[in-house]
Amino acid sequence: MELYSLPLIIALPFVAGLAATLLPSDSRAPASWLAGATTLACLALTLALYPSVQSGGIVRQSFEWIPSLGLDFALRMDGFAWIFATLVSGIGLLVVVYTRYYISPEDPVRRFHLFFLAFMGSMLGVVLAGNLILLVVFWELTSIFSFLLIGYWHHNQAARDGARMALTITAVGGLALLAGVLVVGHIVGSYDLDALLASGNAIRNHDLYVPALLLILLGTLTKSAQFPFQFWLPNAMAAPTPVSAFLHSATMVKAGVFLMARFWPVLSGTPEWFLIVGLAGMISLVLGAYLAMFQQDLKGLLAYSTISHLGLITLLLSLGSPLAAVAAIFHMLNHATFKASLFMAAGIIDHETGTRDLRRLSGLFRYMPITGTLAMVASAAMAGVPLLNGFLSKEMFFAEAVETHADSWLDAAAPYAAVLGSALAVTYSIRLIHSIFLGAPPESFPREPHEPPFWMRFPVMFLVVACLVVGIIPGLTIGPFLQVAVSSVLGAATPQYSLAVWHGFTLPLAMSAIALVAGALLYLFAGDYLERAESPLLFGRIQGQRIFERVMVAISWRGARLVEQVFGTRRLQSQMRLIVAAAVAGAAIPLFASGLGFGSYRDGQDDIAFTGLWAIGMVCAVAAAQRAKFHRLAALVLLGGTGLVTCLSFVWLSAPDLAATQLLVEIVTTVLILLGLRWLPKRSEALGEPSGGPLARARHFRDLTIAVVAGAGMTALSYAVMTRKPPDTIAHFFIEKAYSEGGGRNIVNVILVDFRGFDTLGEITVLGIVALTVFALLRRFRPAPDSIERPEQQRLQLSYDEAEPDRVAGATSAEYLYVPSVIMQWMFPVVIVLAAYLFLRGHDAPGGGFAAGVAMAAGFILQYMAGGTVRVEDRLRILPVRWIGGGLLLAALTGAASMLLGDAFLTSYFRYVDLPLLGKLPLASATLFDLGVFSLVVGATVLMLIAIAHQSIRRLRAARLEEERQVVEERREWN
């Protein structure tokens, strides 16, 4: 079981998230049970691996990904990864329990659990990744799903703004991290995490160390909201409180400091590391605590305190001392427990009172004594009060801050910054307790406060008890697990340390006492001012959100307008001219530098008939380009001629599979374009008039010159390539292995679904995205005003019906092409049989999932053309989005199934099976993958068809509204 535990830990949340979307929309309890069971299973699998890592062992699981580049889907769990995976899945379980009572039944619970579980799986992927590129992939997934979670209440403007800001900052940091990982991989010669951790000296002594360090730290500091990127975290507080309790205490913001701790043995110990990391951590520690004191929003206070505590961890990691690294790892765990409990307590207060404004909350202890007690204990842990877990790690922080680590002003300032930041933490912790629970209650609350249900309060109770137990008996509770985590990071450099509660009267104890007393006195004298303050002193006018918005406006608006003014044009012809000219210049430079010579290789005899066929194709292409400006339908017909020539060329060159696919695609795309032509603006009659001015002739000559040069250049380049003897290719490999290893005689299909199945999976994913994008764009598309009215043919038919007394308006249109429409409707079963035939024969003969999917889509197109949009959709339930999702899921699961059997992703299995009546038939697992391709192609094509077809419904609605408006105007004039 251990062999598959790591993939299961990561895969379970993603699979469960997708399963949650299949539940009924009102299935609040089943979705919660599913999410809870998933997080519990991940936690159980993680805990079961503790014996394997307890003594310094490492659990590894690797699947080949791109072996030629040294890239594997490698998973790795050591003690540090184990304790973080336990933290992520354990707090995830508590948050799921809490969410069951927090989220309103009116909210889309299925969508919440989809995003939540997907984020959890991504975070577990970051923790367990054993390959640097895989780590970056999961890293960026956390940014994407955190964006969706923060913007969960998308009707809220603040949620949308906070989500956009978080995604922008963390995604840019992720791109920087990718670049840094590529540089480090180049230095080490491998992207394997074990190889990286064994190459510390080589990396630190390399010339590219500083660029790699800057790029990696840009990724980690943005993720952990450290200075100067701290401003995105407070704006993310518009998210639901369960999101804040999970993302902003134990997972997302911890990812940055987790990676700094993971890379600590490799990147630390240099002046550059100490200066950059130490400065960012020290400023974040003090600035975050200072700003937290002035917050009037409860979650805002917790957000700035999170920045401060993450700054404490970052500052510890900068010191380069193994003991400081131990303290940093210890505080990561402690901070996750008390901060998650505080966020959930804040959610309870907001949920039960209807507000989280500190100025409107007071005296809640008499209404919510249990919640108040829990929040007070957690706040005391945050302040570093003795006998709580926060006190222990803060003591270790003070002990390291007073040590000398470098001859630098930064090192000398560390003790003072530590005391100052801790004193401010005491102040905002006291303010949180006093403002909410003590004092006289206000005249009224938005809602009558009361204690929440037990199970909503249970996660807070569990975490607060953990704070107490760890603070009182750390050696028996957290000690063994911390030792496992620390030794996996530091290895032989692991120092001796003590988790004893009492070390005697020491300087760190004195610093703790000073911080506690100073913080209490500060609140005593400045508490009233803090309650009334609208903005922080000194920094009230400096707002990170405003700076971010101005930068975004400068880039996305002013910068874009400047580029548009310089290079932009509303005419497609000008844009094409620039693109073609740039392509010609880009190709001409290397050719002029190295020369272009023609070879003497000939493969077979020249064929006059084949040359004539291509001459027809070239004439059609040139004529289509010429007529596109004046007659769109003629241009489309001529373009179809070039497509047919291409099909015949494939047949001529013995590629029937490509010919069949090209023919089907040509038919479907021609019909779709023909349907789309209806909604384009009418061409001006002036376009058909010859323009004989000198400027017009100069423009025409210029365009003709560019076209001739581009065409002649491509012709010469193609001829130069084809007259040289081709190099050895891998074609013979596919010919030899298609049947023996792929189980099919159709080599093209075996390549698509087996040898190059991963490429095909990527291509159908892109096809699905394109179809959804086209549908989304056409939903907002509004036809040109001159295209709304009925076409001339329909107007003539309608006028004929109105002129004849025995005819009803619209009768001629309904009877038009009646016999062909009946035939097209009868053809639907025939097309289905044809699609099934192409699909079933595809592994051994021309056909396959793609060709069958296009054929099936052609059947749906015939139905829409024959019966019209309304009639077809009244009688036929298609649901193309489900076809797309089901096809993509089936293709991916087919590949994943081979991984569960210990083989590479998308490895194919085949055998012959004797079936009654049918005899001996070949069956291959690639057929299931091909079925996924078939389903996605059908869904994508039909979705684009529906998007175009619905324009006719909108046109009728728009025309009806226009007719009603005209009637109203006529009546008004008559009156």
Image (cartoon, rainbow, N blue to C red):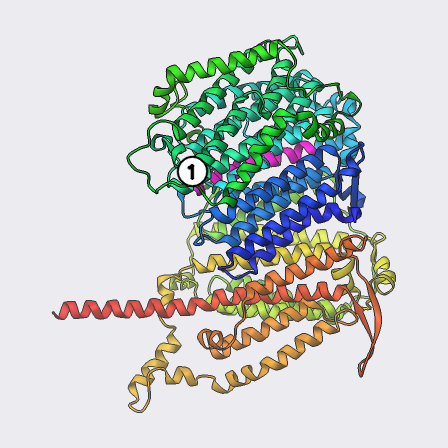
Q: Helix, strand or loop at disc 1?
A: helix
Q: Residue 775: percent from the left, percent from the top?
A: 50, 60
Specify whether 470 is left or right of 921: left
The magenta span reads 158-182
Of helix, strand and loop, which mostly describes the magenta segment? helix
Does residue 635 appear in this view? no
Comparing 4 with 727, the one in front is 4
Specify whether 33 is left or right of 163: right
Graded by Cα atoms within 10 Å as few (under 14), some (14 to 19) or many (20 or more), the crowding at tag 1 reads many
Q: Residue 895: percent from the left, percent from the top?
A: 73, 57
* Image position of 208 with respect to 357: above or below: above
Comparing 60 with 55, the one in front is 55
Reply yes or no: does residue 648 show up in magenta: no
Specify whether 674 is left or right of 180: left
Reply yes or no: does residue 175 show up in magenta: yes
User: Among all residues in the image, which is located at the extreme bottom?
Assistant: 806
Q: Residue 912: percent from the left, percent from the top?
A: 85, 71
Quarter of the image with the C terminus is: bottom left
Task: Name which residue lies at 62% across and 30% down.
Answer: 333
Task: Name which residue lies at 79% across and 52% down.
Answer: 904
Does residue 58 appear in this view? yes
Q: Residue 790: percent from the left, percent from the top?
A: 36, 72
Comparing 626 with 21, the one in front is 21
Q: Which residue is mark 1?
A: 349
What number of labels is visible? 1
Kindly identify the amino acid type of the residue bearing the numbered disc 1. Answer: Ile
Q: Quadrant of residue 651?
A: bottom right
User: Among all residues in the image, which is located at the extreme left?
Assistant: 975
